[in-house]
Image (tube, rainbow, N blue to C red):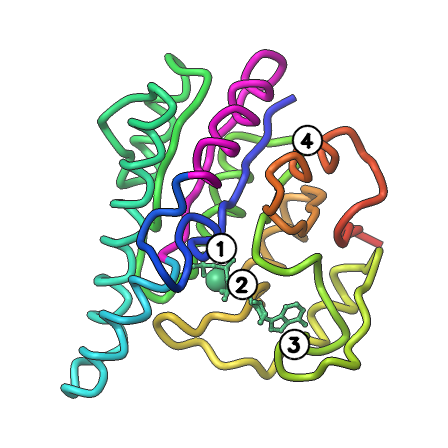
Amino acid sequence: MKIVIKIGGHLLSTPMSIVDLDYVRELASVLEDIKRKHEMIIVTGGGSLSRFYIDALRKRGINEALCDLMGIEISRLNALFLSLFIGGPIKIPNTVEDVLDYSSRRKIIVMGGLQPGQSTTTTAAIIAETIKADLLIIATNVEGIYTRDPFKDPSAKKIDEITIDQLKEMFREKEVKAGTYPLIDYMTLRILERAKIPAVVVNGRPPMNIIRAIRGENIGTRIRMK
Ligand SMILES: Nc1ncnc2c1ncn2[C@@H]1O[C@H](COP(=O)(O)OP(=O)(O)OP(=O)(O)O)[C@@H](O)[C@H]1O
Ligand SMILES: [Mg+2]
C-alpha cells in the first residue's frame, strides 16, 4: 500500500523537552517495520516549539501568513530530525513537485509543511491525493476524534467512525490561524472527499497504534466517505 502518515508535532516532544527520545526511538522502529511492506510519506507537524515562536511573533504584531511560515520551518526541522534519525535522506521536499520527484526513487520520505494558510494535516491530505495513497493516517496526541475537544470537555466521547459530511459539520466554524488549526480542518476534509482517500485518526502514542490502524483494527476514528 501507499500510505501517508501525519505525525503530530506534539508527539515528538514533551512539555519538558524538545525531543522525546524514547518516543522517537519507538516510532523509528515502527516506521522501519512499516517500510518493509509499504511505501510511505511522513508529514511532521510543528508541535509546541512552533506554537512558542508563533505566539511570540503574533504578540509582536506579525501577520498570520508570516507566523505560518515560522511554523512551517519548525515542522521542516522536525522532518529533518526524524528523517536523519531513521537513516532517511537529508533533503526535505519543499514542494509537491519535489515530493513527486523524490518518491520515484525512495520508499520513504519525511517532510513538513508546504504553504502558509494550510495546516500540516491538510498538507498530508494533499500529498496523499498527489501520490494516490491508499490511506492517510493522522497520528496525534488524543485517541481519535471526540464529540468535543477532550482537553476542554472531559465528558466528550470518542467517535469510532464518522463520515466526511458529519465532520464538515463539526469543524466548519473552527478558527484557522497559525498554530491553531484544529485537529481536522475543513480543507483537509475537502481534499479527502475529492480524492476519495480513507483516513484514520489515532493516538500516535504508542506508535504501534499506527500499525494497528494500517491493519484495519478497530482503533482511533475511521473517516468514511459516506
Ligand atoms: N473534536 C476533537 N476531537 C479530538 N481532539 C480535538 C477536538 N477538538 C480539538 N481537539 C484538540 O486537537 C488536539 C490535536 O491537534 P493539534 O493541532 O494540537 O495537534 P497535532 O495536529 O497532532 O500537532 P501539530 O499541529 O503540531 O502537527 C488535541 O490535543 C485536542 O486538544
Ligand atoms: Mg495540528
- Cα–Cα gap, marks 1 and 3: 19 Å
Residue 137 placement: quadrant: top right
Residue 39 inside the magenta-drawn segment:
yes
Task: Determine which residue is flagged by label 1.
Answer: 122
Task: Verify CB contact (< 8 Å) between mark 3 and mark 4.
Answer: no
Asked if the residue under mark 2 is in contact with the one under mark 1, i.e. CB atoms within 8 Å, the reply is: yes
The answer to which of marks 3 and 4 sits earlier in the sequence is 3
Checking the image for residue 211, the label placed there is 4
Q: Are marks 1 and 4 in contact (CB under 8 Å)?
A: no
At x 77% / y 77%, what residue is drawn?
Answer: 156
Q: Are marks 2 and 3 in contact (CB under 8 Å)?
A: no
How many other residues sit within 10 Å of disc 3, few (<14), some (14-19) or many (≥20)? some
Image position of 183 with respect to 7: above or below: below
Q: Nearer the viewer, residue 153 or 162?
A: 153
Image point (78%, 50%), residue name:
222
Magenta-colored span: 22-46
Q: Secondary structure at mark 2?
A: helix
Indicate if the residue with disc 3 has its beta carbon within 8 Å of ligand 1: yes
